[in-house]
Image: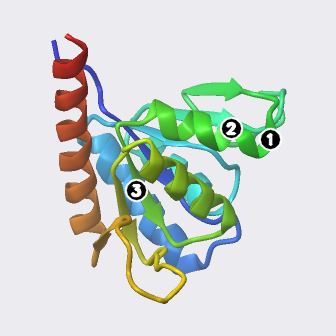
Amino acid sequence: MMRTLHIGVIGPSAAAVTLCAQARTAGAMLATAGVAVVVGGTDGVSRAAAEGAASSGGTVIGFLTGYARSTVQLPLTVAVPTGIGELSNGLLVRSCDALLSIGGGWGTLMEVALAQRTEVPVVSLDGWVLSDGAGQPIAGPTAAATVDEAVEMVRRAAAQRRSTDEHRIG
């Protein structure tokens, strides 16, 4: 039995209009492909991805930083109030088969770092490029040039990870 892939769409809460448009399109494309879209914020990239997924009839899961579901004005299918603030980023990362990072803010960087440490694949669109102290590139998110390419890459990465995890677990 194939279970639904869970793909997080992450990015800055104070996102430019172009990033929000990319996130809305990505959310819609993922939902149309039958993927559950996971978000962690209430504004910017998270809001746009949630709206895009919901507009396409998709499942949208939101990890809330606070305790109250009633205060969130997002089209969520499932709202998970954590009450742990920014630490909810870790819950989002660990619940996903892969992440699509659109743009970059400090919370996004935290999620990318957690994903890298826990082997959750990350595809980046207009996002973080990582380097070491000497300015040399280091392994990090896989870069995509377009929304279409990013969605295809993150879906493949999520399916591969899911297949590997299920084989390892049995």
Please, what is the three-letter code of the amino acid marked with disc 2?
Answer: Ser
Please, what is the three-letter code of the amino acid marked with disc 3?
Answer: Leu
Q: Residue at x 58, y 78 (%)?
A: 17
Asked which colour scheme the image uses, the reply is: rainbow
As drawn, 165 above or below 9 = above
Secondary structure under badge 1? helix
Q: Quadrant of residue 8?
A: top left
Image x and y of residue 104, in percent: 57, 71
Please, what is the three-letter code of the amino acid marked with disc 1?
Answer: Gly
Asked if marks 3 and 2 touch (Cβ < 8 Å), the reply is no
Q: How many marks?
A: 3
User: Which residue is labeled 3 in the image?
Assistant: 100
Q: In what quadrant of the picture does the C terminus appear?
A: top left
The Cα atoms of the two marked residues, 3 and 2, are separated by 17 Å
Asked if marks 1 and 2 touch (Cβ < 8 Å), the reply is yes
Q: Quadrant of residue 148?
A: bottom left
| Circle number at residue 88 | 2
Q: Is residue 144 left or right of 122 when viewed as pictured?
A: left
User: Which residue is labeled 1 in the image?
Assistant: 85
